[in-house]
Amino acid sequence: MDKLLKLGRDMAQLWRSYGSSYLGGVRNTLLLALVATAIGCVIGLLCGILQTIPCSKNDRPLRRFGLGLVRALVRIYVEVFRGTPMVLQAVFIFYGLPYFTDNAMRFQSVWAAAILIVSINTGAYMAESVRGGILSVDPGQTEGAKAIGMTHVQTMTSVILPQALRNIMPQIGNNFIINVKDTSVMFIISFTEFFAFHRYITGVNNLYFPSAAIEMLGYLCMTLAASFLLRLLERRMDGSSSYELVQQDALTMTAGTYSLPGGARGGR
C-alpha cells in the first residue's frame, strides 16, 4: 500500500510539472494517427481495387500485362511493409533517402516524414483488408449489376464498395488503434509524440516507472475512447434495428380472402 501511495504521489508530481507536455504528446499522437490512418485507407482502397480488377484470357495482351505488373508491384509493396517493423521503415525512409541520394532527398519537416511512414505502413495492411472486403460481397451482386448494364466502375462505386466498406469498418478502427500505439516508434526520427515526451521527462528526473504509468493510462484512455466512438459509428452505419412488417400489399389480396367459384373459401 505504501508503494502505491508513493507511486500516486510521484505521478501527481510529474503531472503538476509536465502535464502540458504530456497533453501535447497526446495531441501529436492522435493527430498523426488520425491523418495517417485516413491516408492509409485511401492507399489501401486503391491497392485493394487494383488487385480485384477482373482479367481473363480473352482480354488484350497489353491489358493482361499491365494488370499483372500492377498486381506484382502491389504485392511487393504489401509484403515488404507488412513483413518489416515500422521502426526500421522509419529509419530507412527518413535516413536512407538522404544517404542514397547524397542529401538530395531530405525531409524538411519531421511531421511530413512521420505521416508518410505511418500512412504507407497502414496502407499495406488496409490493402489486404479492402481486397478481402470486396471478395466477401456476394458475386451475385456483381452479376446483377452487369445484367442491368452497369460498367465495372459503376458496379464498384455504387454496389460493391459501399458493402465492402461496411464489412471492413472494424478493421479500419483496429488500424487506427494500432497506429495510436505504434506512433511511439517515431521517436527514432525525433518526432515528439506521447512516448517521446516520456523519454525526455524521465531523462530529466529519473522517475521512469511513475512516468511509464502515466503513459500507460494515457494510451489506454485514447484507445478506449477510440473503440467507443468507432462502435457508435458502426451502429450508425447499420441503421435502425427496428422494422415493421408490411401488413397490406396494394398489389395482392390479404391472405385468406381468396375465394373459389361458388363461394367456397380457399384452403381446407
Image: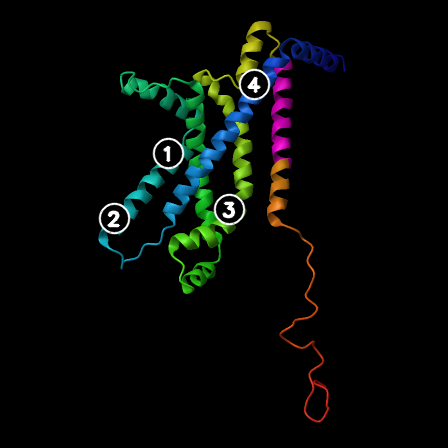
How many numbered marks are there? 4
The magenta region covers 209-228
* Disc 1: CA contacts within 10 A as few (<14), some (14-19) or many (>=20): some
> Mark 1 is on which residue type?
Val
Query: Can you tell which quarter of the image residue 16 is in?
Result: top right
Q: Which mark is residue 80?
A: 1
Q: Is residue 171 left or right of residue 1?
A: left
**Majority SS type along the magenta span:** helix
> Label 2, label 4: how many angstroms apart (C-alpha)?
48 Å
The residue that disc 2 covers is 65
Percent coordinates x, y for residue 240 in the rendering: 66, 51
| Mark 3: secondary structure | helix
Is 235 or 126 nearer to us in this picture?
A: 235
| Dot 2 and dot 4 residues touching (CB under 8 Å) | no
First reached walking from the N terminus: tag 4 or tag 3 = 4
Give the residue displayed 61% in from the left and 20% down from the top: 215
Is 215 colored magenta in this rendering? Answer: yes
The extreme top residue here reads: 204
Q: CA separation, marks 4 and 3?
A: 31 Å
10 Å crowding of disc 3: few (<14), some (14-19), many (20+): some
Q: Secondary structure at mark 1?
A: helix
Residue labelled with disc 3: 165
Q: How far, Cα to Cα, is label 3 from label 1?
A: 25 Å
Circle nearer the N terminus (2, 3): 2
**Alpha carbon of mark 2 to alpha carbon of mark 3: how far?**
29 Å
Q: Amino acid at mark 2?
A: Phe
